[in-house]
Amino acid sequence: MSFIDHLEALRWHIIRSVLFVFSAAIVFFVFIDFIFDQVIMGPTRNDFISYKLLCSLSHSLGLGESLCLPPMDMKLQVTSVSGTFMSSISMAFACAIMVGFPYLLFEVWRFVKPALKPEELKHTRGIIFWVSLFFFIGAAFGYFMLAPFTFNFLSNYKIGTAALLDYRPTLTDYLDTLIDITLGAGVAFELPMASWVLSSMGIVTPDFLRNYRKYAYVALLVVAAIITPSPDWGSQLVVVVPLVLLYEISILISARVNRKQEKKMAEWS
């Protein structure tokens, strides 16, 4: 294919992706009231499922109220005439992109697939399923665990004379924070998949991952600081620990891939 033909193929992939996102956003916009009350504002409610489970776990382990987060009273404000409407559109598109992630990934895969060699295609079998699975696990972790810790800490943080402060964050600020946390956690949980693909292509080895482990841990701390808007060490540890576990899992995955490749090379020899 010529360069123009590649651009034409890419154009149709982009058009289909945009049409899908717009169509899904329209559907979510129709149910925006339910989505806002039950999903978007879920982490700010004191009866959110994460708060109940953490408190029950604390009592079951005999830790008292140590894992029970304090009550949260967060009221949002809108500072522009079109703020509510524009926020509804943002919520609809954010939900469309999140739910439609597998299809968007599928369109990207269809464009990249012809450029891969047969051996590379063999190593990337089922990649859409696994990438989507880790993304949704990460997004769920960000929504159900990280977001409640973040908003609870920020809403209860006090400075100076409390009577002089009226804590009323804007709706836009809240949405941006929630989306950043959810999408950031979803992307961060792609680490094992990246290790599998890169190891299969011979770009990354388990020895490389082990040698650069300490540098990776520092990078993960930076990622945790970016994902968690709050300076609370507890919230950042909630992110760092799973990321460190994912990195160690990535080393195991890379080692397994490397053993299979060495076995094939030995059989071929």
Image (cartoon, helix red, strand yellow):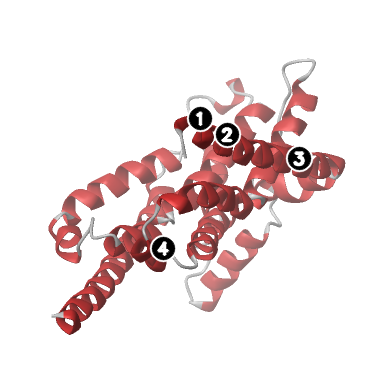
Per the rendering, the mark at residue 121 is: 4
Front in this rendered view, residue 39 or 45: 39
Mark 3 vs 2, N-terminal side = 2
One can see residue 177 in this view: no
Tag 2–tag 1 contact (CB < 8 Å):
yes
One can see residue 263 in this view: yes
Q: Is residue 38 above or below residue 59?
A: above
Mark 3 vs 1, N-terminal side = 1
What residue is disc 2 on? Answer: 8
Rendered location of residue 211, percent (x, y): 12, 58
Q: Quadrant of the C terminus?
A: bottom left
Instruction: Name the mark nearer the viewer: 3 or 4.
Output: 4
Q: Residues within 10 Å of mark 2 (few under 14, many from 20)?
A: few
Give the amino acid type for the residue marked by disc 4 in the picture. Answer: Leu
Rendered location of residue 140, percent (x, y): 57, 57
Residue in the image at 28% along x and 66% along y: 248
Q: CA separation, marks 2 and 1?
A: 6 Å
Front in this rendered view, residue 147 or 133: 133
Tag 3–tag 1 contact (CB < 8 Å):
no
Mark 1 vs 4, N-terminal side = 1
Q: CA separation, marks 4 and 2?
A: 23 Å
Per the rendering, the mark at residue 25 is: 3
Farthest residue toward the right?
A: 30
Tag 1–tag 4 contact (CB < 8 Å):
no
Front in this rendered view, residue 157 or 172: 172
Describe the element under mark 2 as helix, strand or loop.
Answer: helix
Give the amino acid type for the residue marked by disc 1 in the picture. Answer: Ile
Front in this rendered view, residue 115 or 178: 115
Q: CA separation, marks 1 and 4?
A: 25 Å
Per the rendering, the mark at residue 4 is: 1
